[in-house]
Image: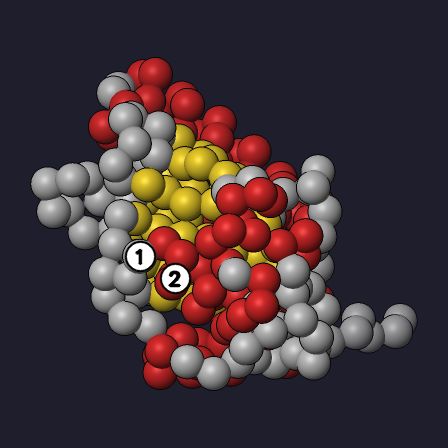
Amino acid sequence: MPLPYYVSPEQMMKDKAEYARKGISRGRSLVTLEYGDGILLVAENPSTLLHKISEIYDRIAFAGVGKYNEFENLRIAGIRHADVKGYSYSRGDVTAKALANAYSQALGNIFTQDIKPFEVEVLVAEVGDANGARNEIYHILYDGTIEDERNYAAMGGQSDEIRRFLKDHHKEGMPLDEALQLGVRALTVTQNKTLTEKDLEVAVLDRTKARRKFRRIPLEALGQLLGTARLGRTGP
């Protein structure tokens, strides 16, 4: 009787992690920045129909990189989770922390129990209210690891280099146009091409809005905020 094929748990986890990281690295990057009036999310995404950035609930946004169908399933599950909790209890009981924990558990279970891990990283952001509550940004990795980010976050294949760039150039309390220009420069720091507004998907969680804080930035407004001549700059 032939012996069953054996792989040590350590090697299996290592292979799964390498597989997931390779899949994520093939996708386009995404950055998140805190600015004066809220949280800005900027992704390289030329598609106008397939979104990487979406609204989850009143004050909460979702972003994903990697395989679209996988993070889209997670997005839909997050919306259902938030709707049920908000309906069963109150809208104030729906928090980014609870959603991030749910995503962490789901991705952790998939990574350890399934043969193929999800090739995704996701981010959940909640903007603080006008009374001084802090913003919350949670970055969840393919294996369920959850990181509490401050000021900025980056996801995708070149995230380490993007984080280093943001660490050197991010300033607290930036206006929206300055934060947007910084986000685009961060995305281009690892590339040899210039990004235009047609290559970008941009949204904000704006604390000055009533109840629903999420809004997308249309192409026309993007062009005005960016200043097309400065899109290709990689310096401060």
Q: Residues within 10 Å of mark 2 (few under 14, many from 20)?
A: many
Q: Is residue 109 above or below residue 227?
A: above
Q: Is residue 140 left or right of residue 25?
A: left
Of residue 54 and residue 84, the one placed in the foreground of this image is 54
Return the x and y of residue 138 as percentages of the image width and height.
37, 56
Instruction: State how many labels appear.
Output: 2
Identity of the residue drawn at 88% across and 74% down:
2
Return the x and y of residue 66 as percentages of the image width and height.
65, 59
Residue furthest out toward the left = 131
Return the x and y of residue 98 as percentages of the image width and height.
32, 42
Q: Amino acid at mark 1?
A: Pro
Residue 74 occupies quadrant: top right
Do the residues under discs 2 and 1 have CB atoms within 8 angstroms? yes
Q: Is residue 205 left or right of residue 76?
A: left
Please state, as top left, top right, bottom left or bottom right, where the N terminus lies in the image: bottom right
Identity of the residue drawn at 51% across and 44% down:
221
Residue 190 occupies quadrant: bottom right
Of residue 178 and residue 124, the one placed in the foreground of this image is 178
Q: Amino acid at mark 2?
A: Ala
Q: Is residue 84 left or right of residue 88?
A: right
Q: Residues within 10 Å of mark 1 (few under 14, many from 20)?
A: some
Return the x and y of residue 169 as percentages of the image width and height.
36, 78
Tell me the colour scheme of the image.
Answer: secondary structure
Q: Is residue 63 above or below residue 154?
A: above
Q: Which residue is disc 2 drawn over?
A: 179
Q: Which residue is disc 1 drawn over?
A: 175
